[in-house]
Image (cartoon, helix red, strand yellow):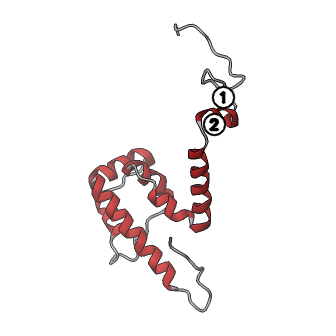
């Protein structure tokens, strides 16, 4: 787990932030390599309605391109394009990530019956109080 401290006025370029930048760049590079830069860019373009090129993604991943930072508004599109939510989890930070993982573990422990009780879903699979047409015709 990566522990991050906020930079102070005395240390504006604190090492943890450089470490986080490097971690994000390596993660982007690894995930887009697995999916393919062109495919990732095309999928992100679809999600965002804005052209994202393989060259842009390469710049975001390159540690030598310090001025090219991955915009946070692209995170959801990137995660969908690569089919991996690791980047979202990374930017949550340690405290929120721990809470998410705790919730995921709790959900895994609950059996199907308990989940239905918590979600108020009766045995027929439809949310309680939902009225539905019993006909197969639409």
Above or below 8: residue 132: above
2 and 1 marks in contact (CB < 8 Å): yes
Quick one: label 2 or label 1, which is nearer the N terminus? 2
* Residue drawn at (29%, 62%) of the image: 55
Q: Gap in Å between the C-alphas at discs 2 and 1? A: 8 Å
* Residue drawn at (63%, 36%) of the image: 115
Is residue 56 in sight in this rendering?
A: no
| In the displayed structure image, the side of residue 127 where residue 26 appears, left or right | left
Residue 66: image location, x then y, percent: 39, 77
Rendered image: mark on residue 105: none
Residue 79: image location, x then y, percent: 43, 52
* Residue drawn at (42%, 48%) of the image: 80
Q: Which residue is mark 1?
A: 121
Classify mark 1: residues with Cα within 10 Å, few (<14), some (14-19) or many (20+): some
Is residue 50 in sight in this rendering?
A: yes
Q: Nearer the viewer, residue 14 or 99?
A: 99
Residue 30: image location, x then y, percent: 32, 62
| In the displayed structure image, the side of residue 12 where residue 121 appears, left or right | right
Viewer-side label of 2, 1: 2
Element class at badge 2: helix
Dividing the picture into quadrants, the one containing residue 32 is bottom left
Q: Nearer the viewer, residue 105 or 45?
A: 105
Classify mark 2: residues with Cα within 10 Å, few (<14), some (14-19) or many (20+): some
* Residue drawn at (57%, 51%) of the image: 105
Rendered image: mark on residue 115: 2
| In the displayed structure image, the side of residue 77 where residue 92 appears, left or right | right
Residue 136: image location, x then y, percent: 52, 8
Element class at badge 1: loop
């Amino acid at each position: 787990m990566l522990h991050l401290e906020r930079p102070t006025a005395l240390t504006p370029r604190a090492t943890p932030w450089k470490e986080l930048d490097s971690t994000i760049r390596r993660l982007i590079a690894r995930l887009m390599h697995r999916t393919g830069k062109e495919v990732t860019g095309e999928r992100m373009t679809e999600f965002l309605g804005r052209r994202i090129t393989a060259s842009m993604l390469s710049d975001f991943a390159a540690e030598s391109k310090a001025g090219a930072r991955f915009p946070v508004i692209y995170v959801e599109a990137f995660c969908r394009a690569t089919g991996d939510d690791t980047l979202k989890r990374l930017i949550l930070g340690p405290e929120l990530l721990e809470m998410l993982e705790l919730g995921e573990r709790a959900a895994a422990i609950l059996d199907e019956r308990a989940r239905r009780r918590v979600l108020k879903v009766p045995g027929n699979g439809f949310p309680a109080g939902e009225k539905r047409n019993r006909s197969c015709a639409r």
